Image: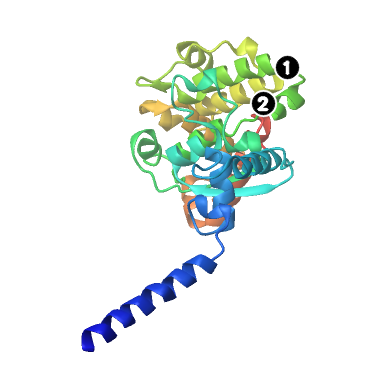
Amino acid sequence: MGEGRGEAVKNDAIRHFLDLLMTRKVSPFDLLPHTDLREKLVELVLFGEPNGGDAETANQFLHLRSALESQVVKDVKVVVFGGGTGLSNLIGGDSRSPQWPRKPFVGLKEIFPHTRAIVCVTDDGGSTGELQKDLPLIALGDLRHVLLSSIQSERLQSLYGIARPQAKKVVSQLAKIFNYRFQRRPESSSSLLAQAGVDHTILPAPLGQTLIAYIDLLFTDTRLIPTLDRPHCLGNLIVAAAIYAEIPPIITHNDCIANHTVLSASTVRGLAALSAIMGIR
């Protein structure tokens, strides 16, 4: 009797779980990974319809994906947090890569034009480390990297009245300027641009003139001149010059260190001015 009762208990348990499973409602969304619906929708847009469903379900997923992709998001505001390389790739590709100028208008900025980046600035290696030996600035290398990657085609076209092919050529020249590294002290701003292989005639006049003015500042502002004696990435120096253009010449490095408000406000204004001429919202 004991064995018979035990088998009956087992059969009752089997029947219980069979009944539960038979009455459970399964959604086609269960075919997609993740538990959050938003993550499931992202998965659908990125990778397409899931396997395992019937033809009707696959067709419904296809239409849903098309509807999501056709959604107008140009006014959506996006804020992205991160470091240099990862953040740059996400926003608009790896702007330090020699191949980047071939396809610069990609990434999150093309989907969401109102994308803002908050960049971690703890890097102290390479040109950034050399720069901080002479200037009391935050690390600029990753900022430079993200600035380049954030350039938007439509913004450049609208700003300077140029077509997309010309905008691509402009970005190619900007990449040469901002990624060029020199080892010896350059003689002048013109020689520096020549060494970088820049054809400044391709740049719209307001953009080219402003960049040259920033580079000239490296040779005329006594606070910036010492930076030319060290090996540097020209883009980092341009960012530094844009910041120091906002600081009156009578204010010294020691003044900046003593009053962080002056330096932080000038950094914000300098980055905003540089972003504005480069086609970055």
Q: Position of residue 121 (x, y in %)?
A: 45, 47
Q: On residue 153, which mark appears?
A: 2
Q: Is residue 215 visible?
A: yes
From the viewer's side, name the closer residue of 232 and 225: 232
Specify few, some or many for label 1: CA neighbours under 10 Å numbering under 14, 14-19, or 20 or more: few
Q: Nearer the viewer, residue 152 or 194?
A: 152
Q: Is residue 250 visible?
A: no
Please, what secondary structure does the residue beneath circle 1 have? loop
- Place of residue 39 in the rendered image (x, y in percent of width and height, measured from the top left): 54, 52
Of residues 1 and 138, the one nearer the viewer is 1
Q: Residue at x 44, y 27 (%)?
A: 96
Classify the position of the N terminus by image quarter: bottom left
Q: Which mark is residue 263?
A: none
x and y percentages locating residue 36 in the rendered image: 54, 59
> Relative to residue 258, is residue 202 drawn left or right?
right
- Lower sequence index among marks 2 and 1: 2
Report helix, strand or loop for mark 2.
helix
| C-alpha separation, residue under disc 2 versus residue under disc 1 | 9 Å
Indicate the amino acid at tag 1.
Ala
Which residue, given by chain and number where applicable, does mark 1 sit on? 163
* Residue plotted at (62% across, 36% down): 109
Seen at 51% across and 15% down, the residue is 193
Nearest to the observer: residue 177 or residue 7: 7
* Residue 116 found in image quarter: top right
Q: Position of residue 149 (x, y in %)?
A: 54, 32
